[in-house]
Image: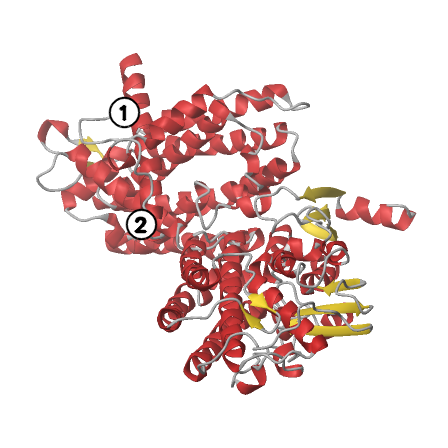
Amino acid sequence: MSSDSEANKDAEDGEVYSLNMGPQHPSMHGVLRLLLDLRGEEVVKAKPVIGYSHRAHEKMAENRNTLQFLPNTSRVDYLSGMIYNLGYCQAIEKILEIEVPERAIFIRVIANELNRVASHLLWFGTFLLDLGGITPFLYSFDDREEILDILDQVTGSRLTYCYGRFGGVTWDVDENFLARTTAFLARIRDRLGMYKQLVTDNIILRERCTGVGVVSTALAKSYGVTGPSLRASGVAYDVRKAEPYGGYDRFDFEVPVLHEGDTMARFHIRIREIEESCKIIEQAIKGIPEGDILPKKMPKRFKLPEGEFYFAVESARGHFGMYIVGDGSDIPVKLKLRTPSFSNLSAMPETLAGTMLADTIAIVGSIDVVMPEIDR
Amino acid sequence: MPIAAGLIMGMLTVNVLMLVWAERKVSAWIQMRMGPTEVGPFGLLQTLADMLKLISKQLITPSNVDKPLYHLAPLLAFAPVVAAVALFPFSQDTILVQNDYGLLFVFAFGGVAVLAIFMAGWGSNNKYALLGAIRSVAQNISYEIPLILSALSVVLVVNAMSPTLGFGEGLVETNGLDLSHIVMAQDQHGIWFVIFQPVAAVIYFISALAETNRAPFDIPEAESELVAGFHTEYSGMRFSLFFFAEYTNMLIVSMLAVVLFFGGWDGPVLPGPLWFFLKSYAVIFVMMWVRWTFPRLRFDQLMTFCWKVLIPLSILNLLVTAFVITVLGQ
């Protein structure tokens, strides 16, 4: 506190002290660290500190060829690894103009949406854990486990998938996969009814979330907030609709939008997105054609043409973009990853100022940050 | 007295071991898990193993703590709960310490616990602990008011029901503050006070959850914000003393609920003390059920709820009770 007027204000309203929350704290997501200035329990200033899980993915991309970078992608955001992995494949396909077989498009959509549901379910559990409700966590993890099993069956991994290949996917899905996915859809719809009764309609939850941590449309736009957090602030922006990729324009689904911009709106948006994803998966299972999962003829080396390219997909957290600069070789000159959580988190200092300490956890939890994705 | 003290300690230790096991099993049941299964039959000895671990752990004293406060706090949290348990009438004849003002003493011992929590938070030299302690003091002091007011409504009813209690030689003048008299009054009229005082019973239960720092009022140790609240810096046996006090407090508020609203030892066939504990554990089960179902309130909502809802309601309940008794008495 430098100026005299501020010092006087402190003397009137009580002393401001700082509290270091994280990177090791039971409910900080991953390794986020928040430097909080508090007056009593009121947050005066919040400053996020990032960089605790920096792994130099972008630098790695400059030192290996395009195919070798593929396993890295799902490690950037480990909760929507499938979306990142397939998104990267789609980016390269777009640059090299590789034709993807129909069946692979449908498989990719199913895998992507399953991954999105899994990510939202994990968020549902951990967010309620932040609010002190321990039981929903175990239920949603139980649901998520089923998705991991389904994806494990076809991809061989549970979290950091490397399922995509340029031009298609590695393994074909079988009847069992489709049957289990259909069974899962019935199960999750049943569970969502229970969650609505026990969690969404709970008065304590609504009291804690309604009107808390309002991100206005202007604030969201100015910081580049994307994903469910943006849609809760009244902007109907979803990459799947705005710039359809990977065959999403063939499916009938809605982009849920709410205008309150508070924690409760973000909660509702994610629950409704689970339902929308279920709708997409249902249509994809119905319409999946027979055929190849990889193109007949593939280039040996994936040489990037000279120039700059940008391709974006909708991850579970928002707009995930890849800015790729090629120079004619198969090693990118630069691969910049535009990850949604970074922008979403940047809006937090303004949102958190003036809230209560207990709300800090709820608000930061509600934007669903994944730290490795921010640090990359 | 030493024998009585030994009895209580033994009973409480077994009780805490059982409660921790029960809490794990209940939470596991609610959450579709197994709970402890490995140590002993149904995992019954799991808590014993945990206790041995806690006892054998090194006691860490962090630097720059306020030593007297830091060391005294666990003891001060532990001692009053043991003392309070001694006051309860497990049956008409099984009372370790007969006291004419038992109800008052139980609340008084409950009040001492707040001091211990604040000493722990203040002495720990940790901001999370201090925040937890500040919340805890505000919460406990606030919720003691509706807790005591709801109990007072029952005392009024006891005093009004009959001037004397008991039969033949054992006839005594009614004293609503005496815990065994409260039960005797219910026993004699064959009715539980939860029927006369449903509002008081609900207020009591809610306040009791807050008083024992149980979810959804577990704000002083809200782990998502305050790590572990006031006992963040305590390890090993010092932590387990707080833990012991917390679980025994659960038993105390449940036993008091049974005395005030559910007819104490009163029940058919089975011996009195057994009924008493069965009822107490039923109340504890509801507390556990609540804990594993609801999220946590925010601190300001908690205080608003207490001062704007519970306290006016309990005062109103007390006034209505007094009014009805006066009207009926004439």
At label 2, counting other C-alpha atoms closer than 10 Å, the crowd grade (few under 14, some 14-19, many 20 or more) is: few
- Residue B164 picture location, percent across and down: 19, 36
Q: Quadrant of the N terminus of chain B?
A: top left
Residue sitting at x 49%, y 68%: A114
Q: What's the chain of the residue with tag 1?
A: B
Give the x, y percent position of residue A311: 71, 74
Q: Quadrant of residue A245?
A: bottom right
The location of residue A268, given as percent across then percent down, is 53, 71
Question: Do the residues under discs 1 and 2 have CB atoms within 8 angstroms?
Answer: no
Position of B44 with respect to B291 (left or right) is left
- Name above or below for residue B270 compared with residue A129: above
Q: Which chain does the numbered disc 2 sit on?
A: B
Q: Residue at x 70, y 46 (%)?
A: A52
Is B181 situated left or right of A186 in this image? left
The residue wearing badge 2 is: B29
Question: Which residue sits at x=36%, y=39%?
Answer: B253
SS at badge 1: loop
The spot of residue A143 in percent (x, y) is 41, 61
In the image: residue B282, left or right of residue B299: left
Circle 2 — which element? helix
Type of amino acid under label 1: Gln
Asked whether A80 or A344 is in front, the reply is A80
The residue that label 1 is drawn on is: B98
